[in-house]
Image (cartoon, helix red, strand yellow):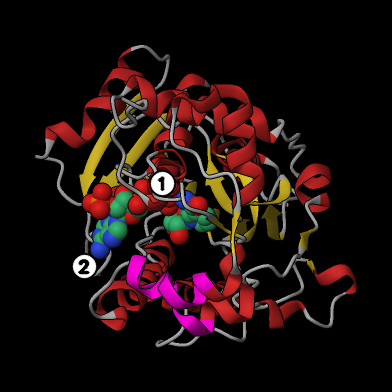
Amino acid sequence: MTQINPASPVLVTGGTGYLAGVIIAQLLGKGHVVHVTVRDPDQREKLKHLEAVAAASPGSIRYFRADLLNPDAFAPAMAGCELVIHTASPFIAHVEDPQRDLIDPAVEGTRNVLAAVNATETVRRVVLTSSCAAIYGDNSDIAGMPERRLTETVWNTSSTLGHQAYSLSKTRAEKAAWDIVHAQSRWDLVTINPSLILGPGINPQASGESYSILTQMGDGTMAAGIPDFRIGAVDVREVAAAHIAAGYTPEALGRHILSAHDTGFVEISALLREHFGDRYRFGKSILPKFLVWLIGPMINPALTRKMVSRNVGIPFTADNSKSREALSISYRPLAETVTEHFQQLIEAGRIKPRA
Ligand code: NAP
């Protein structure tokens, strides 16, 4: 049981990120003092959405410069904090060097943040943004589970540096965090393991993977056919609320799957078409698996033939009962998440209607 004093400042790492922006906005809305690390606080353009939210909220914000690979960067930002929410980690589909671009910042970054936690006497709890990718890489990870069901007991054992390196980065980072917390007793760790996060963020021009997937649904990329990727999806507002509940619920413990809907690209595209009609270039039919296998790697280097063979068209389910019971999360309908997110892209001029 860890009671966090809500009047003490809370640190959120990776403040320029899609998810972090919504977490920070919710914390500011509740009146918290939020310390935020960013790689470069002098890039005011990247902070202007946070600035606007802070100006309209009862809480307050302070920025600190911190790169994940700098072991000395996080202690100044943590001073006086009882709660640390560590979201920063590269979420990039295209990388040149997976060790340098994904594994090192995710794993060394987590070690650096937690070394600073060990050195900061005030910290009592860390909430780590992990991922369903740390639970599940290929479908084979859940082949033995009833209904191919993801639960908090499962770990990704199928990802390697050459195959789904992002998933490996999240698995290794979360494992490193559990090793570090178990070596001491002053602070505890709660992880949030979201599936694909969608829904409007605070920055309509955000460039992360969640934004690019939804953009590709409507810009014609999938007009010739939609790959039958089975995914879990969850709204960014629920994921943010779960981080905050994990921080301030004394009995919160262990991993939490945040996944609202067992769905797929085909269903999401159909929801968007139903709401926005044929004004946008949504796909209608499923792209046969052999074509995804054939052309996937040319469209997106993350769509390797091994990844496509092992995952496309194979359904799974995610057990979100712990998030509902332990963190009191209630999930909104998928249609609301994807249509509000898509509307944000339209208003930002990022998706053009048919000529
Ligand atoms: P995002 O918008 O790309 O945010 C990533 C954040 O990490 C950015 O603030 C980025 O800073 C920071 N970062 C990356 N490398 C860094 C480094 N070397 N030093 C300091 N900061 C660094 O991605 P997101 O979707 O919000 O993801 C946030 C977290 O949620 C990540 O841990 C991700 O693995 C996890 N997650 C995301 C999803 C999803 O569907 N989006 C699902 C499950 C889990 P810069 O702006 O300076 O690059």
Residue 351 horizontal/vertical position (percent): 34, 31
Q: Is residue 340 above or below residue 95?
A: above
Q: In the image shown, does 341 or 329 lie closer to the viewer?
A: 341
- At x 51% / y 27%, what residue is drawn? 278
- At x 79% / y 81%, what residue is drawn? 143
Residue that lies at the very extreme toward the left in this rendered image: 42
Q: Identity of the amino acid at label 2?
A: Asn
Residue 83 horizontal/vertical position (percent): 50, 47
Q: Is residue 115 above or below residue 203?
A: below
Local SS, label 1: helix
Magenta stretch mostly in which secondary structure?
helix
- At x 58% / y 41%, what residue is drawn? 269
Count up the numbered dots: 2
Region of the chain picked out in magenta, as a range: 291-306
For disc 1, the marked residue is: 216
For disc 2, the marked residue is: 70
Q: Identity of the amino acid at label 1?
A: Gln
Quarter of the figure with residue 70: bottom left
Residue 62 horizontal/vertical position (percent): 27, 33
Q: In the image shown, does 29 or 212 lie closer to the viewer?
A: 212
Q: Is residue 216 magenta?
A: no
